[in-house]
Image (cartoon, rainbow, N blue to C red):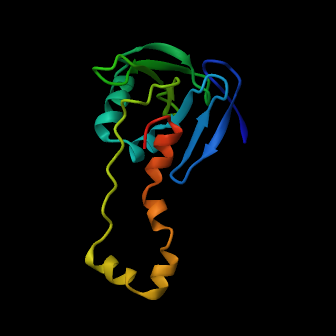
Amino acid sequence: MDTDLPCPACRIPLTEVRTEPGIIWRCEKCDGRAVGLQLLRRTFTAESINPVWLHAIHNEGSSGRRCPSCGNAMIEVGLDNSSGIRVEVCRICEFVWFDAGETQSLQVQAASDPAPAALAKIQQLPEARSANSGSVASQEWWKQIAAFLGMPT
């Protein structure tokens, strides 16, 4: 589904991609991606994401391209201290723009173990087994995001 959000690099409309945990916008021409900060925080480790936002809110970067959502200038900040990759962040919309290949150094969160004793008992019920048959896929939603961002899963 196309949206009215323009690619900050190419200015063509971004394509909205719906995943289980949230929405990502992708440019079909340059392969860039706009991802909301909340989705990034749910998908990747705090160590991967927090420095980006901290640099942006402390204005520790240079003026970047226009935000695809609000049109304000994003701030270009370092993704981390070692890769030299710079991403653009909108402090208003909380969008992070990744050019093609810029997500490689992000660390995916480890899947949490949702098996407390009460849940284990519930899963033993026949109704729960049939209703829970797709739980493996739903517990690995992060793989969808990682793959979409061009990362190995």
Query: Could you tell whether 99 is left or right of 71 in the image?
Result: left
Image position of 103 with respect to 138: above or below: above
Q: Which image quarter is the C terminus in?
A: top left
- Please tell me which residue lies in front, 102 or 24: 102
Residue extending furthest toward the front: 152
- What x and y, as percent, mark residue 78? 36, 20
Query: Could you tell whether 133 is left or right of 67 in the image?
Result: left
Image position of 56 with respect to 35: above or below: above
- What x and y, as percent, mark residue 43? 41, 45
Image position of 1 with respect to 4: above or below: below
**In percent of the image, x 49 and y 73: which residue is there?**
133
**In percent of the image, x 64 and y 24: which residue is there?**
7
**In percent of the image, x 46 and y 81: which residue is there?**
128
| Count of numbered circles in the view | 0
- What x and y, as percent, mark residue 117? 26, 78
Q: Which image quarter is the N terminus in?
A: top right
